[in-house]
């Protein structure tokens, strides 16, 4: 294809960022090519996962109702694992996001395939099985892509190629991925009958639970998650790869130990693992985002731009990927064919609260890098509960003294104050 026969946009990667961008642009009548290296959208993607539906509403109101989502999350749970048990905080709200349900559990293969197909239905041209290897540059501007012997040209190239964005590196917007800016996730999907899942998690038909797991990483920085799907459970861990390697531990072993933990095993018992996946996730948030999200003729969206927020209780990447895809599409639509797309994109990210959200959580990474959060505090919480609930016929200790003893067993006052101060500063 020659530079004269160019498309309005080429989007590299049919994950949620790429599909959202393609959908909005194609719906507005733009000529769009959506290139995906996988044989189909979603077949290379791994997530926790849950999706906050407000993001799909931005693409098109009501779209979430058509999406292959799993269960509406009505129970938010935090589980602190100790040696032999767990303290679980269970917050149930049956009216959570009544108008637009706040979040659903999601399986990425069907979701991504559906989303890319919806973009195609709007008129985007989906090209699967193609790995984009090069960008084409002319006079300092990105004007197209190369995949094998093929060259395709466009007014703008959208890099939606995920956490390990080769395209962002090629464009000079990011350096190599370093181990301290990403987490490594491993996850199993464990099949169980619908009724069994509902009984084990105290759910009614269609309702779901999302559980954050703390103290499950064998002392490695990171944590775990559990989401209930219709007929399966997604269980996994996201760990710091540097710390994992430094401690000579294997993520698979940590996930296996988590499955066997006495408080977790009864939840997955008799289930069959039907999927195992591992993937990187941007970990640091705002501070590790590329300083520039665009250059002439190219913008970065989703994980390629490091757009993930991890607050310790909530991991958000899919919704931010969709929002950034919409922002890029809106910037293109407002700047018909001209090179102002980059600044317009950043303005849209501000309008859609993406950059402000990333900034708000900018210091959480430091808080979550506190090793004591991974094992000391979960064990302390479990010991405190044990003290509260132990009855053995002996004269109980005064509660304040007993609690102080537990506290001193795990941390010094200095550590407690320092951690509290760090926590306050981070939020
Ligand atoms: C274990 C784990 C748990 C997570 N849990 C959650 C969760 O519960 N909720 C949440 O919101 N987020 C979660 N995330 C984060 C979320 O999955 C990501 O933020 C999100 O998938 C980013 O979407 P994206 O479209 O930017 O990138 P991706 O989903 O990674 O899509 C990128 C696409 O680009 C394609 N591609 C890459 N390179 C090329 C190339 N050169 N040419 C052509 N195609 C290419 C890939 O095949 C892929 O389809 C989790 C992540 C992990 C790893």
Image (cartoon, grey):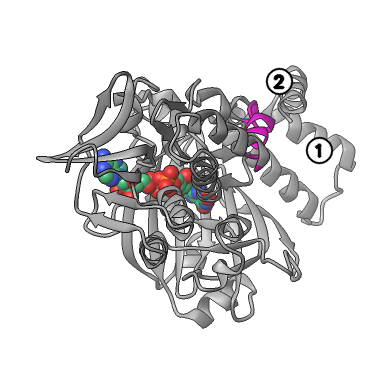
Q: Return the mark for residue 380.
A: none
- At horizontal 71% and vertical 22% (from top left) the residue drawn is 422
Q: x, y (%) of residue 268?
A: 46, 66
Q: In the rendered view, does 163 fall on the left or right side of 148?
A: right
In this view of the protein, can residue 220 be seen by the observer?
A: no
| Label 2 sits on residue | 415
Helix or strand or loop: what does disc 1 sit on?
helix
Q: x, y (%) of residue 51?
A: 55, 57
- At horizontal 76% and vertical 70% (from top left) the residue drawn is 95
**Which mark is in front, 1 or 2?**
2
In the image, the segment drawn in magenta is 352-364
Against 197, is 44 above or below?
above
Q: Of 8 and 355, which appears nearest the observer?
A: 8
> Was residue 359 drawn as part of the magenta stretch in this picture?
yes
Q: In the rendered view, does 281 fall on the left or right side of 2?
A: right
Decide: few, some or many residues near mark 2? Use Cα within 10 Å; few <14, some 14-19, many ≥20: few
Hey, which residue is sitting farthest left in the picture?
A: 149
Against 81, is 91 above or below?
below
Q: Of 156 and 369, which appears nearest the observer?
A: 156
Helix or strand or loop: what does disc 2 sit on?
helix
In this view of the protein, can residue 165 be seen by the observer?
A: yes
Q: x, y (%) of residue 270?
A: 40, 73
Image quadrant for the N terminus? top left
Prevailing secondary structure of the magenta residues? helix
Mark 1 → mark 2, Cα distance in angstroms: 17 Å
| Label 1 sits on residue | 403
Question: Which comes sooner in the sequence, label 1 or label 2?
Answer: 1
Tally of numbered tags? 2
């Amino acid at each position: 294809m020659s530079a004269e026969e160019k498309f309005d946009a080429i989007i590299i990667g049919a994950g949620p960022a790429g599909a959202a961008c393609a959908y909005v642009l194609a719906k507005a009548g733009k000529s769009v090519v959506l290139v995906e290296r996988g044989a189909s959208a979603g077949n290379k993607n791994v997530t926790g996962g849950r999706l906050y539906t407000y993001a799909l509403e931005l693409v098109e109101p009501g779209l979430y109702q058509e999406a292959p989502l799993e269960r509406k999350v009505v129970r938010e749970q935090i589980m602190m694992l100790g040696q032999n048990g767990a303290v679980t905080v269970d917050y149930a709200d049956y009216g959570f996001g009544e108008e637009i349900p706040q979040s659903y559990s999601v399986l990425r293969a069907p979701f991504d395939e559906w989303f890319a197909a919806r973009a195609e239905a709007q008129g985007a041209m989906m090209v699967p099985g193609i790995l984009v290897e090069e960008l084409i540059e002319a006079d300092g501007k990105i004007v197209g892509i190369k995949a094998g012997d093929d060259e395709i040209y466009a007014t703008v190239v959208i890099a939606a190629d995920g956490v390990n964005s080769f395209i962002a590196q090629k464009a000079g917007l990011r350096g190599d991925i370093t181990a301290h800016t990403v987490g490594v996730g491993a996850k199993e999907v464990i099949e169980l009958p619908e009724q069994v899942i509902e009984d084990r998690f105290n759910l009614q038909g269609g309702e779901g639970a999302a559980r954050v797991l703390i103290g499950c990483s064998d002392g490695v920085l990171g944590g775990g998650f559990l989401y209930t799907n219709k007929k399966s459970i997604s269980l996994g861990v996201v760990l710091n790869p540097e710390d994992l390697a430094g401690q000579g531990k294997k993520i698979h072993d940590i996930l296996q130990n988590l499955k066997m933990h006495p408080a977790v095993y009864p939840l997955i018992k008799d289930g069959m693992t039907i999927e195992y996946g591992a993937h990187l996730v941007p970990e640091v948030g705002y501070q590790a985002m590329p300083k520039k999200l665009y250059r002439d003729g190219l913008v970065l969206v989703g994980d390629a731009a490091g757009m993930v927020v991890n607050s310790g209780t909530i991991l958000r990447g899919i919704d931010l990927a969709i929002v950034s895809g919409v922002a890029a599409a809106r910037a293109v639509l407002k700047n018909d064919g001209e090179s102002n797309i980059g600044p317009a994109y950043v303005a849209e990210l501000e309008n859609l609260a993406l950059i402000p959200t990333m900034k708000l959580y900018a210091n959480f990474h430091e808080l979550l890098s506190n090793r004591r959060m991974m094992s000391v505090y979960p064990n302390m919480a479990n010991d405190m509960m044990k003290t509260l609930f132990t009855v053995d016929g002996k004269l109980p200790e005064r509660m304040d003294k007993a609690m102080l003893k537990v506290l001193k067993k795990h941390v010094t006052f200095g550590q407690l104050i320092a951690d509290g101060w760090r926590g306050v500063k981070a939020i």
